[in-house]
Structure formats: structure tokens, C-alpha cells
Amino acid sequence: MKTAKEYLAEANAVVPRISPDDGIAKHNAGNSLFIDVRDSGDITKSGTIAGALRIPRGFLEFAADDNLPYFNANLSKDADIVLVCAAGGQAALAGKTLKDMGYKNVCNVGGIADWIAAGGESET
């Protein structure tokens, strides 16, 4: 049996955590795909990264599987993907899922509050 802490440790071991400043640099460069994995209600309350896809963690496997009708065509296994959530935990777990599904370049920028505090561009 695994605990939540063990799942998170495994995810953090394979999904690099980048600073908000590094995330902002990626955002400004325009070559990365940003995904907010929180539920829509949470995004409504705090906003999200400008231009980020909104794919809830509970739906991610369906949106990321190109064999399903739910596949999000914005996703590419070769894209530079940056995940965000409320504090970084959901983004890490979602990142591990994407890596397990064959997505190669996935990182975790942590929580949206840190992004906004660092001056990252956001939207509602």
C-alpha cells in the first residue's frame, strides 16, 4: 500500500519543479504549453495563467489520450508542458501521469498564488 506522501514523492522525483520566475520566462518566450489542473470553481476564484489550458486533474488521462474522442488537440507528446495548481501537489501528480503516458517535457511551476505574486500574467 502507498500513502499520498509516497505518491507525491514519486511524482516530485520525475517531474521537475521550476520557480515562478522560470515559469514566467517560459511564458514570455511563448514556446510552452501551460495547463491548470484545478477544477473550474477554483480557477474562477483565483484566476489562472494567461492562455493556460484548463484541464482538471480528474479528466487529464482522457484529454491526454489521442486514442479517445475526449483528446485535447492542443496537447502534444513533444510539447514543453508547464503545469500549475493551487500549491504544486496536484500539478506534480498530473505531471507524473503525463510522463507515464509518454509526454516527454513536463514540469511543475507550483501554485497559482506564487505565480501571481511573482508578477506572472494571469486571467480569470
Image (cartoon, helix red, strand yellow):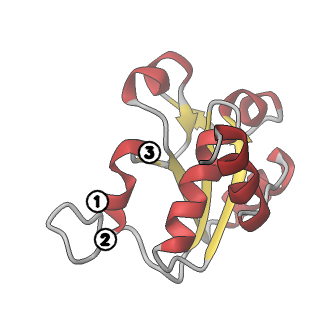
Badge 1 marks a residue whose secondary structure is helix
Q: Identify the residue shown where x is 25% and y is 66%.
A: 71
The amino acid type, in three-letter code, at marker 3 is Arg
Q: Earlier in the sequence, mark 3 or mark 2?
A: 3
Specify whether 85 is left or right of 56.
right
**Which residue is depicted at the point 53% across and 83% down?**
78
Whole-percent x and y of residue 7? 65, 50
Give percent across and percent down for residue 17: 79, 55
Residue position marked by numbered label 1 in the rendering: 62
Position of residue 68 measured from the top left corner of the image (x, y, whole percent): 18, 70
| First of labels 3, 1 by sequence position | 3
- Which residue lies under the disc numbered 3? 57
Q: Can you give x and y, in whole percent of width and height, for residue 74 in the image?
A: 37, 67
Residue 100 left/right relative to 67: right
Q: Is residue 21 above or below residue 121?
A: below
The residue at the point 29 percent across, 63 percent down is: 72
Few, some or many C-alpha atoms within 10 Å of disc 1 (few <14, some 14-19, many ≥20)?
some
Q: Which residue is mark 2?
A: 65
Total numbered badges shown on the rendered structure: 3
As drawn, which residue projects farthest toward the top?
Answer: 45
Dot 3: within a 10 Å radius of its alpha carbon, few (fewer than 14), some, or many (20 or more) residues? many
Is 74 located above or below residue 82 in the figure? below
Q: Are marks 2 and 1 in contact (CB under 8 Å)?
A: yes
Q: CA distance from mark 3 to mark 2?
A: 14 Å
- How far, Cα to Cα, is label 2 from label 1? 5 Å
In this rendering, position of residue 87 left or right of residue 36: right
**Is disc 2 surrounded by few (<14), some (14 to 19) or many (20+) residues within 10 Å?**
some
Q: Amino acid at mark 2?
A: Asp
Relative height, residue 5 to residue 14 (above, below): above
The residue sitting at 52% across, 76% down in the picture is 103
